[in-house]
Amino acid sequence: MNTLEVAKKWQEMCQQGKNIECIEELYADNITSKEMPGVPYGEVISGKKEVLEKSKQWLDDVIEFHSGEISDPVVAGNHFTSKMSFDVTFKSRGRQQMEEVCVFEVKDGKITNEQFFYTM
């Protein structure tokens, strides 16, 4: 898959709530994931197993998704970006409205880097 195909598949899977399946299918084994400073599961995570665990921890903390939106990806070379907005109730911190920009790098048809920008 080229970058646009990966980006569209990523968007489709995330919109369907298939976050774990998305990581399993589209992420490289040596994926690097970067979060904003201060997140409980670490700012930089490397490896598909570790990224899966981070995502599972985040999802396990969710009580209810009230709404969510994932923008169409914008592709530039081997990178794509998307804006995600959520209204979520968490076990640990109650209901929050979240908005973030996500940037991904694709090599050989797999996501090799992801970085999330948001206000804590």
Image: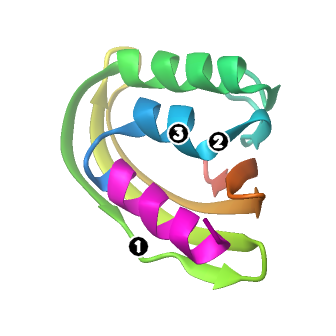
**Residue 104 counted in the magenta span:** no
Mark 3, other Cα within 10 Å: few <14 / some 14–19 / many ≥20: few
**Mark 2 surroundings within 10 Å by alpha-carbon count, few (fewer than 14), some (14 through 19), many (20 or more):** many
Q: Considering depth in this image, is 75 or 38 the residue closer to the camera?
A: 75
Residue 109 to residue 45: above or below? below
Q: Is 17 placed above or below 55 here?
A: below
Majority secondary structure of magenta residues: helix
The label nearer to you, 2 versus 1, is 2
Q: Marks 3/1: CA distance?
A: 21 Å
Seen at 29% across and 41% down, the residue is: 17
Q: Are marks 2 and 3 in contact (CB under 8 Å)?
A: yes
Q: Which residue is mark 2?
A: 27
Q: Secondary structure at mark 3?
A: helix
Q: Which residues are magenta?
A: 1-14
Numbered mark located on residue 71 in the image: 1
Query: Where, by quadrant of the figure, is residue 62 drawn?
Result: top left
- Name the kind of residue labelled 2 in the image: Tyr
